[in-house]
Image (cartoon, grey):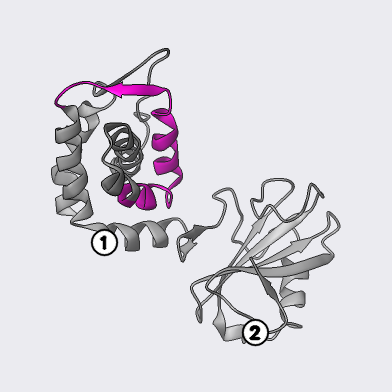
Amino acid sequence: MQTWLFGFVALLWLMPAAAHAAAGSGSRSSEHWGEMQKLEYHIGQISGVLRICGNYTLAADLQELAKLSPYGRKGMASVQVYDAVKGGYCGKLAAEGERLMADRNQLWTYLTDRYNCSGGKCAPAEGDDSTAAVCRAEVDEHLKTLPIDADDIKTIRMINGNAGSSQVRNGKKGHEAWVRLGSCDGWLIIETSIGCTPRQSFTRGDCAIEGIKGY
């Protein structure tokens, strides 16, 4: 943690002054965010700008971390308008990127725990983990019919309406349950109708469950 925050102040001011675009301007992190949220945002920014610099390997390494955080993804999106980087900044940002990558394992653990990610696959941030969530009772009953030990279920996140991101519903309205298991590195996703009737179940990541398709 100390290493990440050591370079934090520098990260705040190197961006967006480092890059310029043919049109438009970059965005800054919100003053209402906490220090770690701002850091996640700037990891995303650095990954995007280093790609413009041609430092593709380091950019890809940082992008892997940035994608774990909604703030990191915002940071990546904020530099998409840029088409060039001012002289000297590529080296400074690469140095900051290397400093962050020195704590890569700590960052990965923090981000996956913070944003409920498994195997690099993150549940949509707008979900509801509570037992009172819409369709949660129906999902709990459906889980009892699947070849899964109840003790293996770590979390269940309900994604309501059209907020889900499984991209398997093919436009059908409904709900999703993202089930995180302790025995594998990935997700079991259960899709339901608007009325909470289970439609299909499938896995993402490195989870394999007998009789259930993986994507």
Residue occupied by mark 2: 148
Please tell me which of labels 2 and 1 falls first in the chain: 1
Residue occupied by mark 1: 106
27 lies above or below 103: above
Name the quarter where the N terminus is drawn.
bottom left
Q: How many marks?
A: 2
Give the residue displayed 29% in from the left and 57% down from the top: 107
In the rendered structure, the answer to whether residue 151 lies left or right of residue 171 reads left
Q: Within 10 Å of the Cα at label 2, are there few (<14), some (14-19), or many (20+) other Cα atoms?
A: some
Q: Which residues are magenta?
A: 61-88
Front residue of 215/25: it is 215
Give the residue displayed 27% in from the left and 63% down from the top: 105
In the rendered structure, the answer to whether residue 199 lies left or right of residue 20 reads right
Q: What x and y, as percent, mark residue 119? A: 46, 66
Name the quarter where the C terminus is drawn.
bottom right
Instruction: Tell me the amino acid under the disc marked 2.
Output: Ile
Q: What x and y, as percent, mark residue 197? A: 85, 65
Q: In the picture, residue 208 is in which quadrant?
A: bottom right
